[in-house]
Amino acid sequence: MTYGAGQYRYELQPHWAKMPRGRAFVDVSGLAVDPADNVYVFSRSDHPIMVFDREGTFLLGWGEGHFNRPHSIKVASDGTVWCTDDGNQTVSAFTSDGRLIGQFGGEHGVSGIGRITGIAVAPNGDVVVGDTNAERIVRFDADGNFLSASGSEGTGPGQFRDPHDFWFDAAGRLLVVDRDNNRIQVFGEDNDLLGQLTDVDRPTAVFVDGRGDIYVSEGHQRVSVFAPDGRLLSRFGSQGEDKATALFHTPHAIVVNSEQTIFVGENRHGLGDSDAPARALQAFVRLENQEDQSTPGRTNNVISA
């Protein structure tokens, strides 16, 4: 079956990840991809971090016993793998082969954070995380020293209701998933609000590819693709369908590799269907040589350059 629209149509590649015996994803809370197209799967399982090459072959894993409740993972430009844990309130940094090289937070949480969520690494190496207790964005340096905080609870510009995930694009803009406000706010380097995506339904994660296209996983059973200016390019999912058999249950993470394959991670634990662990991570391969077939094109989003 083909999903999506226009030049952004995809085909599901079942069981993309070749799992080693005795491992399962359970809930995939975070995904990351590195320049070699290796996919990092961050799951709430006995084996929290598992890495696969672009063909889905298992490469390595780590994190056993380190995490309480995995939430978000990103790979920085220098190859450092950054993770947040909203159970023990920590931010951890690893080398690409799993060696712990830094951590802040712990028993008393991350300084200045009530409840930690998503993470992103700025072009200068600063670390940005979400604080859902205070409904704000907090910035630290790479050593965990507090630098600044912005935002408050509300629905106005620069306010948040569950700042859930973050992404710095090539222009240095920060995209903030404002989950319970059903929008993604876009900020410039000086923290000025440039615009927002509002044509989303409980967004959970965002990814921006090298062309500037914006990919959003939405908790209400769908995935959307937007142009850099906010125009809707493609959308697919299973809204309103029985979650036990639908294409998506609760998408929580999204990344895209250089071949424009979309990877969607979701929370499927407790569904009771035997295929739930396998479907917690799904890969959608973009179809080649497509004709432009009535791309949706509509928008109520406004994003400035």
Image (cartoon, rainbow, N blue to C red):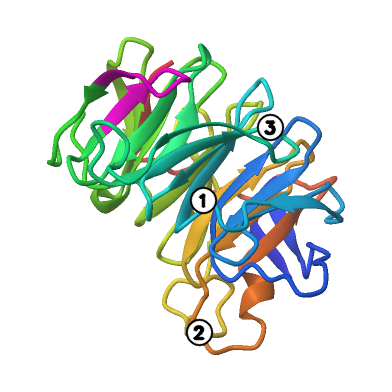
Residue type of the residue flagged with mark 3:
Thr
Q: From the viewer's perspective, is residue 267 above or below residue 30?
A: below
Q: Which residue is mark 3?
A: 95
- Given the image, on which type of amino acid does mark 1 rest? Ser
- 108 or 33: which is nearer to us? 108
Judged from this view, the residue extending furthest toward the front is: 107
Measuring from the top left, give residue 189's x and y in whole percent.
38, 12
- Residue drawn 50% across and 61% down? 251
Which segment did they paint magenta?
Answer: 137-148
**Residue 81 vs residue 297, the one in the foreground:** 81
Above or below 170: residue 293: below
Circle 1 crowding by C-alpha within 10 Å: few under 14, some 14–19, many from 20: many
Work out whether residue 83 or residue 206 is closer to the camera in this orientation and state it.
Answer: 83
Describe residue 100's horizontal placement relative to residue 193 as left or right: right
Label count reads 3
Q: Which residue is identified by label 1?
A: 224
| Residue annotated with mark 2 | 271
Instruction: Give how far apart the Cα atoms at labels 2 and 3 are.
Output: 34 Å
Compare marks 1 and 3 and give the one earlier in the sequence. 3
In three-dimensional space, the C-alpha distance between marks 2 and 1, rounded to whole angstroms, equals 24 Å
